[in-house]
Image (cartoon, rainbow, N blue to C red):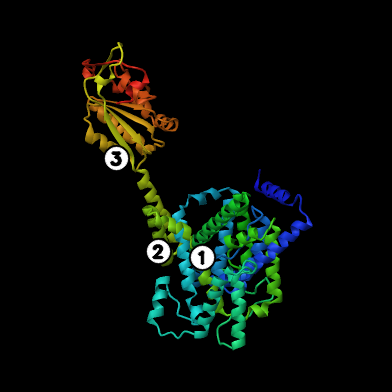
Amino acid sequence: MNLVGEWRTLLRREFSNYSFGIFQKDLLAGLTVAAVALPLALAFGVASGADAAAGLVTAVIAGVIIGFLSGAPYQVSGPTGAMSAVLIVLASRYGMQGMWLAGLLAGAMLLVLGIFRLGRVVALIPAPVISGFTSGIAVIIALGQIDNALGIQSPPAENTAAKLLGYFQQDLSPNPYALLVTVLVMAVMIVWPRFKWGHRLPGSLVGIILATLVVVAGGWDVPTIGAIPRSILLENRLSLGAVPWQDLDALVIPAMSIAALGAIESLLCGAVAGNMTGIRLHNSVELVAQGVGNLVIPFFGGVPATAAIARTSVNIKSGGVTRMTSIIHGIALALVALLAASIIGRVPMAALAGVLFITAWRMNEWHAIHFYFGKRLKHAMIAFTVTLVATVMLDLTQAIIIGFGISTLIFMSQMSDLNITRQPVDASRLAKSDQKVILPAHPISVYYLVGPLFFAAARKLVESIEAQDRADATLILSMRGVPLIDATGVEALREIWHRQHKGGGNLLLSGLPARSESLVQRSGFLDELGAQRLFWSADQAILSLGVSLPAAPETRPDDDEFDATLIITPHEDRAMQNI
């Protein structure tokens, strides 16, 4: 079924029994989500390097368009903290037009990911990398709000470290009123959920309202959001005539970061919500929805959006049934922009800083962090820490690449730990019956291999054999515990075979899995070795040595290679279990 057909099926399933009672549930949930989304939209708009109006417009457009096209009934999209950390760097380097162009490119990339059903690629990013990336973004968000919290305007800096160091090197005069407002909002957000009515109204909204009232009543001189346009079509928006086309090449990589982050957040949100509701997210449909939404948003003056776990969770807990919840939440925010713009404009910037400080703290995946460090999982700890530091100190694109690279190296290190157990064959213990079987006089060793035989482990096998057995020995490699062989592994087997054959020894393979046997055959090594040297089990390989063993023409051993000096008798397949 194509994506359009899948989306239509989702709609029919959701609205087949739609009624006024269900609409009431969606309406209540939509208004609740809007109450939660309003302060976050304003805050993330500012944190993205744009303004509060851009964040509000993003929430409106994403709520309606992405919500309508979504791959699940519960997804709610809008501006997010993780995305804002990427965007503020873009805005400072390339201006708003450059940021919008990158968002447009990211939307096209997300659309392609969805159309070609490539969402599963996102699952290849290890969990510690995602956790480290998220924590790094939380640090960036928090550091980015120090100016608003102190009521100052510090000089721009090249990177986060330079920005933080500048606070100690420059003579800055904090505004005590701004600091009080920040602390007030943070205190409300921490305390408010403890009250029984706390779940009905978000603490962030309560904190902003209370802080605004205090500032107005006290006549405090603190920076505020300022004028909010009474429109969702902002005057400052993407204009093709003002696009910095000369920066297009430089914006491709940041656009890939935005697309990757949007895909990760949206699919992760869907996975979490799917566990809460039992309704599976259609990944490809969701990516198409995110792509279409982010193609449209820049032309309204908004910032790139993605599915938001917090707002989606509120939707589910508030009883939302269909995607109408997301649409209603977007319409409600549009009405706020049209009817309450003058009130929103008086919100102190320090209040938004308080919201973002608490949000940044809560963004951290503390359960995962406690698990990694509490259980002392060294590889996870390394991947998490390296990604976190890279996210804070470097470009976020570089952070993802570094984190993924570190995790890949760690994974290969773990996988390359090929377990090799050598067991010499004691022929005298095989005398179990009257049937005589003649074995070669030279040593026989069985190597039991456990683990993938790929490029990172192949050399270990060769070196282990060379260190323990002579070239005139007969080697049996039991490979039942080898789930994977790559080209380098096949070359290692070929190297061992050539060594043994040249030295007058022999090589037999047993228990080779079908997938690995197919590669060995396609590589031509099986023809070189001879199919008669391939056995189901190690005991069958040993017993076969007492029979005249045909060899491939180019690898036939000399006649004096076998010496009938050891005599054993077979006793079914169980005879080899004690070897």
> Where 469 sits versus 429, above or below?
below
Q: Which residue is mark 3?
A: 460
Q: Which residue is mark 1?
A: 362
Whole-angstrom CA distance, mark 2 to mark 1, is 19 Å
Q: In front: 392, or 179?
A: 179
Could you say where residue 398 lies in the image, as x and y percent from the top left?
Answer: 43, 60
Kindly identify the residue that appears in the image at 73 percent across and 49 percent down.
12
Circle nearer the viewer, 3 or 1: 1
* Count of labels in the image: 3
Q: Is residue 144 found left or right of 565 in the rendered image?
A: right
Type of amino acid under label 2 = Val
Name the outermost residue toward the bottom: 219
Q: Which residue is mark 2?
A: 389
Q: Secondary structure at mark 3?
A: helix
Type of amino acid under label 1 = Arg
Q: Secondary structure at mark 2?
A: helix
Mark positioned earlier in the residue sequence (3 or 1): 1
Could you say where residue 272 lies in the image, as x and y percent from the top left?
Answer: 57, 54
